[in-house]
Amino acid sequence: MLAAYARPELAGLWTKYSKAPLDPLAFSKQLPADCSDGLRRFLSSWLSLAPQICAKFGVDFPLLCDRLALEQSTAKDLSLWKRHLWPTGVKLADFCCGMGGDTFFLPQEISVTGVDLDPRRLAMYQTNTRALGCERPTLCADVLQAKGKWDFFQIDPARRSKLEANQRKTEAMTPSWLEIAQLLPRFEGAAIKLAPGFPLEELPSSASITYLGNRTDCRETLVTCGALADPEPMVRAICLPGNLEIMAPRAILASHTPQEQDLGRFLVEPNPVLVRSHLFIEWAKPLGLWQIDAQIAYLSGDVQPPESPWCSSYQVLDWCELGRDRVRQMLKKAGIRPMTLKKRGVEVEPAAELKALSVHQGQPGILFYTRLRNQKVAILTLPPEIR
């Protein structure tokens, strides 16, 4: 795959084909006759990834990767936020470095070594850091046995080896959390990238935990240990862009007793970063909001909260116990045609349920299937833009 960079006639094909839809047949005819079948397949796949590569890393030239490396790599916005974790001048090991997403945007004052057991990933890392003007040394080694003079480490453990696998399954982590924890005593501190659903009870009580994402998705859980942790371990929710932050001590979150109440005039849906971090409870307090069910991350109140990336709020029109006939009657009475069905705490396939309700006339609305004080209910609301 490095031949794509080493040979000028191949690199030139990127300029010609990466900015337009790829025609595999036309592209194949442009390749030199001595290109192997394997290189042809790689180049075709690589060029088809061009829009995703450019969007994820903010570049307009080819970073070297395959689809799995691209999907598992850290995007530019998250990497730019994380670069401020590191003290100036430290020596950092980038364990499980992959194609290099966690290294690309680190300042040059930080000495970084990319460490990975896969030579193909190291080739990507070397090529990409060179292309971005931030070339770093590499080491091909099992990260659990790697030797070097490093102060800190960051690690992005692999969560799958095949494209079709679920990369958020914590049991598929390689190395495992227990293996990573064994590295901690050898370093001053560490930043460990985990899937958003990682069980918090498995993490050391001295670690701080940061949930990174945007208005629509929680994309990463970052565990900071040792010198990178807060004196009082904290939980943070970071919403990008804008670096919006909400935080609370882990001890306070662990002692929360949910206070559920009946449905108010507004139903409030915290964004996924607040939900994953469980900080929606702390965020809700000064706004006078409450949970409608102790196990569900929907909030309610009689005063609409200010417009914010932290939430979406909906004016409640009506609600009923869950049941298709009761829901149809409620929709008919309100003159509402549901355009979207959101669910939490209820097993239902939204598209199939909307089709089964067969309501095709009326003002647009949004249905919520959820629980209210442990009772399964349907809540009918207006879309935010119609309030």
Image: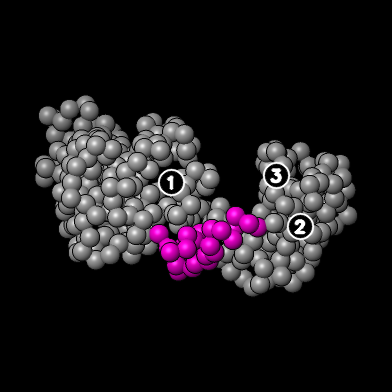
Front in this rendered view, residue 141 or 352: 141
Colour scheme in use: one colour
- Judged from the image, the secondary structure of the residue bearing numbered disc 2 is loop
Label 3 Cα crowd, 10 Å radius (few <14 / some 14-19 / many 20+)? some
What percent of the width, then of the height, locates residue 26? 26, 37
Q: Which residue is rendered at x = 24% and y = 37% of the image? A: 145
Tell me which amino acid carries mark 1: Leu
What percent of the width, then of the height, locates residue 349? 68, 38
Q: Quadrant of the N terminus?
A: top left
- Judged from the image, the secondary structure of the residue bearing numbered disc 3 is loop
Q: Is residue 236 magenta?
A: yes
Among the two numbered marks 2 and 3 on one chain, the one whose residue lies closer to the N terminus: 2
Tell me which amino acid carries mark 3: Gly
Q: Are marks 1 and 3 in contact (CB under 8 Å)?
A: no
Residue under pointer 3: 345
Viewer-side label of 2, 3: 2
Q: Which residue is rendered at x = 32% and y = 58% of the image? A: 58
Q: Is residue 76 above or below residue 31?
A: below
Which label sits on residue 260? 2
Among the two numbered marks 1 and 3 on one chain, the one whose residue lies closer to the N terminus: 1
- Region in magenta: 229-256
What percent of the width, then of the height, locates residue 268? 68, 61
- Judged from the image, the secondary structure of the residue bearing numbered disc 1 is strand
Label 1 Cα crowd, 10 Å radius (few <14 / some 14-19 / many 20+)? many
Question: Going by the image, does 250 lie left or right of 3?
Answer: right
Question: Going by the image, does 300 lie left or right of 281?
Answer: right
Among the two numbered marks 1 and 2 on one chain, the one whose residue lies closer to the N terminus: 1
Q: Is residue 352 magenta?
A: no
